[in-house]
Image (cartoon, rainbow, N blue to C red):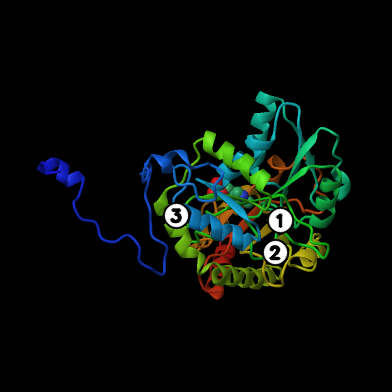
Amino acid sequence: MKLKPQTALIHAPRKAPQYINTIQAPLYRASTIIFENTDALFDRHWTDDYDYSYGTHGTPTTFTLGDNMAQIEGGKYCLLAPSGLSAINLVNSCFLSYGDEVWVADNIYGPNMEHLRNLESRYGIQIKVYNSIDVESFQPTPKAKLIWLEAAGSVTLEFPDLVKLVKKAQAHHLLTALDNTWGAGLAFNAFDFSEEHLSVDISVHALTKYPSGGGDILMGSVVTRDQKLHHQLFRMHAIQGIAISGDDAAQVQRSLASMRIRYEHQSKSALYLLNWLKTQNTFAQVLHPADPENISHPFWKATCQTEQSAGLVSVIFQPEYEITTVRRFCDALQLFKLGFSWGGPVSLVMLYDLKTMRVLPQQHLQQGVLVRFCIGLEDTEDLIQDIQQALKTIT
Ligand SMILES: Cc1ncc(COP(=O)(O)O)c(C=O)c1O
């Protein structure tokens, strides 16, 4: 066919051969995916491992990242979502129906709780809150459908009694969903974390943190081992139109190569900082599950590999330091930037008011303003110097 110039611009006459072997997987950007012929159009099925039919469904770029995340976490199947919170919401909207009871740890990632509260008021889901280090506080009724676990929990960083909680949940036929962002698939294997090879059903991961590692990309994943669960999630993923950009997937895929090294470095820095923070009498308590004095330390020790404990440390200021003073401390920090999130190259700090965040009594925590440090990739001595100079402005 002889083409007019405008058509020739679109239907380029020559295309370089499409396959070469490269270090990084090729980047595909697609909404439309072109079928070879009508057989290819009609012979496909959405449950095929690699069903290339439309951009929302997946491309080689997104399936490559998904396969890698499943492998890193010890699972088999993976779905990607545009943020960690969107991955959490996918699980909630897939498995919870009217009248179901959902069990949530008191220290769960706050927006997960907010999403569940929204479902509670609009769709009659019942939320029950448990203490992640006290299995007795978890008393599922026959209506219980799902338990959310988080290891370690948000902000106060208690490592849960995973073994007892998962055993009890299984005995009562609950689905177990773990927010695995802190462990990142590196600190422990969510699908085989005890001598008895206990496993959660679903692992959700905010790839925004360690897998991205740049502080510049939002993404989430939902990993399972069970094909039936995966297909349920996959269907919900499709009908909700959840999709991620190929560019973002390629960036996260590229960062995976350095994730373990970054995680180890940040874990070590956090442990070093923990020990230094404990020597400072400005703080009533320093919170980190690898600290032998931490109430959840035995659970961390039973589950995690030594020195794999992420880059988060929280402190509770002595009660005489009021919020205005702690704000001055945060404002005086130079290397630690004030911002949400973690797992990136830049160290971050955030203040929290526990009184507005927890519903159960917190006997193991001191009273006082809480500040969470997220360790980046800077030299730890410089970070300590930064905290020292900021402390001088308030003491
Ligand atoms: C434990 C945890 N889970 C999930 C998320 C949500 O991730 P995203 O920011 O990608 O929505 C966060 C974000 O801070 C988090 O800390």
State the count of labels.
Answer: 3
Q: Which mark is residue 298?
A: none
Q: Alpha-carbon neighbours of circle 2 within 10 Å: few (<14), some, or many (≥20)?
A: many
In this picture, is 87 found above or below 27?
Answer: above
Q: Cβ of disc 2 within 8 Å of ligand 1?
A: no
Q: Which quadrant of the figure has residue 22?
A: bottom left
Q: Secondary structure at mark 2?
A: loop
Query: Sequence-wise, which precedes: disc 2 or disc 1?
Result: 1
Task: Tell me how far mark 2 sits from mark 3, CA to CA.
Answer: 28 Å
Query: Sequence-wise, which precedes: disc 2 or disc 3?
Result: 3
Quarter of the N terminus within the rendering: top left
Q: Which residue appears at 54% of the width and 47% of the height?
A: 48
Q: Which residue is mark 1?
A: 151
Q: Secondary structure at mark 1?
A: loop
In the rendered structure, the answer to whether residue 295 lies left or right of residue 377 reads right
Q: Position of residue 328 (x, y in %)?
A: 55, 54
| Label 2 close to label 1 by CB (< 8 Å) | yes
Q: Which residue is mark 2?
A: 188
| Label 2 close to label 3 by CB (< 8 Å) | no
Q: Which residue is mark 3?
A: 60
